[in-house]
Image: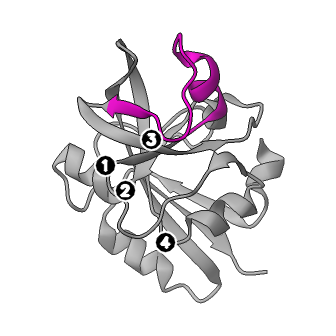
Amino acid sequence: QFDKFGTRRVFVGTKTANGFGGPPSGSTTLSQKDLDTVKKLSFLEYAEALFSNRFEMGYNREKFSRDIYGISIADVEKAFADLDIKLESGRWFRKGDKYVTVLGFRIAKDYFDKEIHVKNVVTIDGIRFDVIGIIEEQGDQNSDYAVRIPIDTMRELMDDPKGLSALTATVKK
């Protein structure tokens, strides 16, 4: 897992944010101002915001409590390429996407009784989300069981328009 994270990536989280053993959680002490400050650092290629919380996720009449990750979508393809994470099917987030999700391999394949495919609909906090992508199997729980949505949608769900749980940044080559 550390090999994929690489030597060029930096993780900044709150006391309760845990970038390797689980999702950032608890109260947020980072802000949009922090992200904007980090983005101005000349030695960084890009920086991304993360905002996560536990919500009820449903599919085909089954419901489970899951950690949901709101992620920045501006550099999403580049960020996942840098981690050597590819889609098995579907697409990444695009500007304007709102109630859509990209699922980890195990969430899609065997978390629920019935397999989830691109174009299926899941619910998160009772709201319908279109599945637009499924990530190739990575072999680690953090990726294979991840449920990702656009960060602006997460902020709406949390009623916190500027909420952040963590930041990741990539140093220029």
Instruction: Tell me how far mark 4 sits from mark 3, CA to CA.
Output: 20 Å
Q: Which residue is mark 2?
A: 151
Q: Nearer the viewer, residue 146 or 120?
A: 120
On screen, residue 9 versus residue 117, left or right, reads right
Say which residue appears at 76% left-offset and 37% top-offset. Answer: 138
Instruction: Tell me how far mark 2 sits from mark 4, CA to CA.
Output: 10 Å
- Of helix, strand and loop, which one carries label 2? helix
Categorize mark 4 by other alpha carbons within 10 Å: few (<14), some (14-19), many (20+). some
Image position, residue 171 (x, y; %): 69, 75
Q: Is residue 112 magenta?
A: yes
> Which is nearer the N-term, disc 3 or disc 1?
3
Instruction: Tell me how far mark 2 sits from mark 1, CA to CA.
Output: 5 Å
Whether residue 15 is visible to the viewer of this picture, yes or no, is no
Q: For the residues carrying marks 3 and 2, which lies nearer the camera in this image?
A: 2
Instruction: Tell me how far mark 3 sits from mark 2, CA to CA.
Output: 14 Å
- Of helix, strand and loop, which one carries label 1? helix
Q: Which residues are magenta?
A: 103-123
Q: Which residue is mark 4?
A: 74
Q: Which mark is residue 43?
A: none
Q: For the residues carrying marks 4 and 3, which lies nearer the camera in this image?
A: 4
Q: Which residue is mark 3?
A: 24
Q: For the residues carrying marks 3 and 1, which lies nearer the camera in this image?
A: 1
Categorize mark 2 by other alpha carbons within 10 Å: few (<14), some (14-19), many (20+). many
